Image (cartoon, helix red, strand yellow):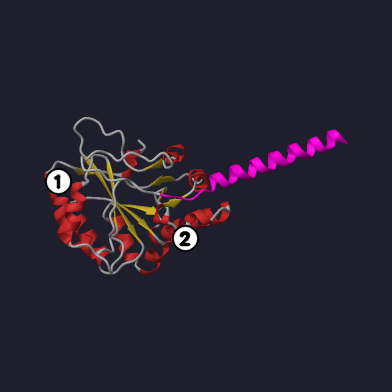
């Protein structure tokens, strides 16, 4: 009898440990980068360094020699007249970037998505419907958010979507990262962003340009929202300044090659 109770106790301990480990992997994190004023790559917080275990990236940490490079990325959920203007500015500079899109953009503005493809931009997965992915712990539901968007993209373009994923609002868990890697995705965050997403609280053009340029760093993954009227207005000047300073605009694939 004593041996039986000992066995039961071991099972309870193992079950509790398993639940604790599962809970840890489901812990929700909010991505952030602390800006500095010396144009160096922001350091990862200890809690965020976990991304490196699961094909997660936030910048090119291995830029070599005198190569000066910026990676332009845009989280594009819908068109309000500004996404097209962003594409115009990129085209004028022969610059390419990465657009993380939602199902809504494919459904309502497929011509814009086709333009992204035809003009050489990388089109990436921002999920089909922009949920808080940390609340999704079922693998099939997680896969569905990415797979269904990739299917919509293929039906529109006849091409496979890039296996590059960005969690909505930068919210993620270790389990999310593991699921994405299992699907063959690289998870890409950013090393610079600013408060540009609220169309009712847009920063002035000069202030936004000043803020962006104050935090430029080599290997930077820059996140801009292309629905921002301010971003649409300043992008041409921003790209001109970066080009004058010797920067090129690289492909995200450089982060893992």
Farthest-out residue, top: 65
Quadrant housing residue 37: top left
- Where in the figure is residue 247, as x and y percent of width and height? 18, 42
Is 79 magenta? The answer is no
Q: Relative to 212, is 254 above or below?
A: above
37 horizontally vs 113: left or right: left
Give the CA distance from mark 2 to mark 1: 36 Å
Residue depicted at 42% across the width and 42% down the height? 48
Quadrant housing residue 66: top left
Residue depicted at 24% across the width and 44% down the height? 70
Badge 2 is on which residue? 131
- Where in the figure is residue 251, as x and y percent of width and height? 29, 44
Quadrant housing residue 39: top left
- Where in the figure is residue 181, as x and y percent of width and height? 48, 43
Determine whether the residue tagged by mark 1 lies in a helix, strand or loop: helix
Q: What are the residue bounds of the magenta stretch?
A: 1-30
- Where in the figure is residue 192, as x and y percent of width and height? 28, 48
Decide which of 129, 197 is in the foreground and name it: 197
Task: Identify the mark at residue 243; answer none if there is no mark.
Answer: 1
Which numbered disc, 2 or 1, marks the residue closer to the eye?
Answer: 2
Q: Which quarter of the figure is the N terminus placed in?
A: top right
73 horizontally vs 141: left or right: left
The overriding secondary structure of the stretch rendered in magenta is helix
Query: Which numbered disc flags the more N-terminal residue, 2 or 1?
Result: 2
Residue depicted at 21% across the width and 30% down the height? 65
């Amino acid at each position: 009898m004593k041996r039986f109770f000992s066995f039961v106790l071991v099972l309870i301990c193992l079950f509790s440990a398993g639940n604790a480990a599962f809970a840890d992997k489901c812990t929700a994190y909010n991505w952030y980068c602390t800006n500095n004023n010396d144009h160096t790559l922001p350091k990862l917080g200890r809690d965020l360094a976990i991304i490196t275990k699961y094909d997660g990236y936030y910048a090119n940490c291995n830029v070599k020699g005198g190569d000066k490079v910026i990676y332009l990325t845009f989280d594009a959920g819908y068109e309000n007249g500004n996404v097209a203007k962003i594409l115009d500015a990129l085209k004028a500079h022969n610059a390419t970037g990465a657009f993380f899109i939602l199902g809504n953009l494919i459904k309502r503005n497929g011509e814009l998505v086709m333009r992204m493809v035809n003009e050489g931009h990388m089109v990436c997965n921002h999920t089909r419907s922009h949920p808080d992915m940390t609340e999704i712990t079922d693998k099939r539901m997680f896969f569905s958010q990415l797979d269904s968007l990739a299917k919509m993209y293929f039906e529109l373009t006849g091409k496979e979507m890039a296996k590059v994923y960005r969690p909505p609002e930068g919210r993620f868990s270790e389990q999310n990262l593991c699921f994405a890697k299992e699907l063959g995705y690289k998870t890409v965050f950013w090393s610079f962003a600013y408060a540009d997403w609220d169309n009712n609280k847009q920063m002035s053009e000069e202030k936004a340009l000043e803020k962006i340029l104050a935090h430029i760093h080599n290997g930077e993954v820059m996140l801009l929202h292309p629905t921002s009227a301010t971003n649409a207005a300043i992008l041409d000047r921003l790209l001109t300044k970066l080009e004058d300073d010797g920067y090129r605009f690289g492909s995200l694939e450089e982060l893992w090659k």
